[in-house]
Amino acid sequence: MRQECPCGGNPKTMRKSLLALVLCLGLAGAMLAQSGSVQINAGGATFPTPMYTKWFSEYNKMHPNIQINYQSQGSGFGKAQLAAKSIDFGASDVPMTDDELSKAGFKILHFPTIMGADVPCYNIPGVTGTLNFTQKALAGIFLGTITKWNDPELAKANAGVKLPAEDIIVVHRSDGSGTTFIWTDFLSKISPEWKSKVGAGASPNWPVGLGGKGNEGVTGTVKQTPNSIGYVELIYAVQNNIPYGNVQNADGQFVKASLTSVSEAAAGAAKDMPDDFRVSITNAPGKGSYPVSSFTWLLIPAQIQDANKREAIKAFLKWMLVDGQKDVEALTYAKLPSNVVAKETKAIALVQ
Amino acid sequence: MGTIATTTGPAPAPSRVQVLLRRMRDGDEIAHLITLIFAASILVVTAALVYELWIHSAETRSQFGWKFLFTSTWDPINGIFGAWPYIYGTLVTTAVALVIAVPLGLGAAIFLSELAPPKISSSLSFVIDLLAAVPSVIYGVLAVFLLEPLMRSTIQPFLKHTLGFLPIFTGPAYGFGYLTAGIVLAIMTVPFIISVSREVLLAVPQDMREASLGLGATRWETTYKVVVVYARTGILGSIFLSMARALGETMAVTMVIGNVPKVSASLFAPGYSIAAVIANEFAEASAGLHLSALIELGLVLFFLTFILNGIARVMIVATSRRGAGASRQ
C-alpha cells in the first residue's frame, strides 16, 4: 500500500485521511461492542414510563456497558412488538391473554414491577368534601342508570353532604389505555350488568359519557364541566392536586387511594398469586385495600438466545426487585409486597 | 440535424446513443429523468399506502363487508365494528368548518388584495402565513380553555334560544361536540383560504380591472363580477386545500369533539371523527380485529378524500368551461 504524505490542503489526501478516520472509529466501535456492550430494546406501557426511564438510566450508570432503550408507546404496542420479536422485552399494564400468548408462538413470562390505582375525580359546584362511592353507585353512574347527583344510592353513603339535583356528566378516556382497562376490570367484577353489557378492555363501548384524550384530557374536561365525574391514575391526581373520592372495597369499607392502601390490595391478592403472575387485584379482599388497583408487568421471553442480553436482563430484574424498589415511592407508585418480590426472585431462573 | 449529417458526407449520422449522450451533457435529459423520478415517487408512495391499508384491513373487510361503513356500533371488546359515526362526524365537522371558513376567508382575501393599502395587505398576509404554521395541538389547547367554556355558557344557549326550532341546535350544551370542533377547524383552515386566494386574486391582470372600470362598473362590481370570476379556479383550489386539512385534522378535533361514537342530528352533541379515533385507539389496539378495523378506517378516510377531491376537480373543470363559453359569446 502506498503511503500518503499528510500534506494539508490537498483535497484528495484530506478525503483519504477522513476515510481512514471513519474506518478507525468503526473498528473501535466494533471492538467496544465485543468487549461486552449490550444494547437492549424494550417498549410498551406508558403508565410506568417515569419509573422505567429512571431505572434504566440508573442501571446504565452502574453498568455503563448495558443500555436499555424504552419506547413508551402503550401496552398494546409492548405486547404486539414483543410477539413480533422486534423488541427484546415488553411492558404492559394488562396481562397477556391465553390467546395472545399462544399466538406469540414462544413462551413469555410476566414480572410485576410496580403498582398503580385509578381514582374517581369529580367537579360538583358546592361540594368540597371527599365523596364516598359505593360499588353500586359507580357501576350505575358509568352504566347510565344513575343519572342525578342526588340519587339515593349516592346520598345514603354521603350523609351530611348536600348533593345537587343535577345530571351527572360522565367523562372517560378516549384513547385506549391501561387506566381504562383497570377501571372497566373493576366495574366488571362488581357489576354483572357491566360485565355482560360492556366488559373489561382498553377501549370499551361506553354506554354514556364524553371522551377525553389522556389523563390530562379527562381532568381538563372534568374541571371545565360542572357536575361531571371521571377517572384518572392516582399519581396524576396527586401530582395535579385534583380532588378524588373514596371507593367501597370488597369488605364494604370506603377507602381512599394511597400508596399504602394500594400495596395492601396487592398483599391481599398475593396469597393466591398464580405462578405466572397474571393476576388482577381489583376488588381485592382486605379491610384496608383500595379496590381499583393493579400491577404493571414486564413481559420477558422465557428463552433469550443472545447470552449477553439474557444475563443483562436477568441481572436487571434482580436489581429492580431489590434496589429498584427503593425508588418507587418517590415517584408516587406503590411498592411490590415482600412476598411477591420473593416469588419473582425465584421466577428469574426461568429465563434461559 | 439529419440533413447536416448527410451533406457533410463521411461523418456518420449520430446514433441514438450519441444524441442521448449529447442531451445528457446539455443537462436536458438529466433534468427530465430526475424530475420524472420525483413525480413518480409520489405515485409510488400513494400506491404503497393504499396497498398497505388494503392488505392490513383484510380481516374486517371480509368479516363485515359494506356493513362496516353503515353500522354504528363500535365495540372493540366484543369485536363489533361499524364506522358510520366516525364517517358522519368527519363529514359534519368539515362541513361546519367550510360553511364558516369560506365566506370569512374569501372576504378577507378580497379585502387584502383589492381594497387594503399595499402596506397593510403585506403585513397582514405575513401574520396570516404565521397562523398557518401554528401546530394543531396549540389550537386544540386554546379551544379547550377558551372556546369550549364560551360555547357552553354563551354561544350554545344563545343559538338554542334564537334558532332552537332547527334540529341542529337542540339538546344539552356540553361545550364539547360537532359545532365546537367545526369552529376550531374553521379557525385553522381560514389562513389557507386567505393566503392562497389572495395570491390568486393578485395574479388577476390589472387590464381586466381597468377595462371593467372603464366600462362604467363600480369598484365592487369589478371585484365581484370580474376579478373573483377570473380567479375562481384558484379560489376553489384554496377551498379544497382547506377541506383536505379539515378532513384529516386529528389533534385539535379530538380535544373538543367529545369522542363519543354516536350519530346525532344536533351540532351540540358530542361525536367522533375518523382521524381522531385512529389516533386515540391505535396504540392500544393489540387484537387483530381492532387493529384491522382502525386500518380500514384509514382506508375509508383515504377514499373519502379521494372522492371529495374528484368532485372538486369536476367542479373546477365545469366552472372553467362555463366561463370560457360565457366569454366567447
Image (cartoon, coloured by chain):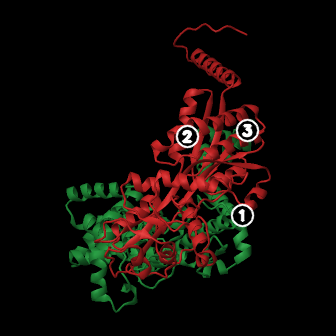
Callout 3: helix, strand or loop?
loop
Residue A149 visible within the image: yes
Percent position of residue A317, x then y? 65, 38
Residue B9, label in figure: 3
Percent position of residue A212, x then y? 45, 66
Q: Is residue A118 left or right of residue A191?
A: left
Instruction: For marks 1 and 3, give the one nearer the viewer.
Output: 1
* Numbered-mark total: 3
Percent position of residue B265, x then y? 45, 85
Residue located beneath label 2 in the image: A325
Question: Three-letter amino acid code at disc 1?
Answer: Ile
Q: Count residues near mark 1 (Cα–Cα under 10 Å), then give few for <14, some for 14-19, many for 20+.
A: few
Q: Is residue B187 left or right of residue B59?
A: left
Residue located beneath label 1 in the image: B55
Which subunit holds the residue at mark 2? A
Question: Three-letter amino acid code at disc 2?
Answer: Gln
Which subunit holds the residue at mark 3? B
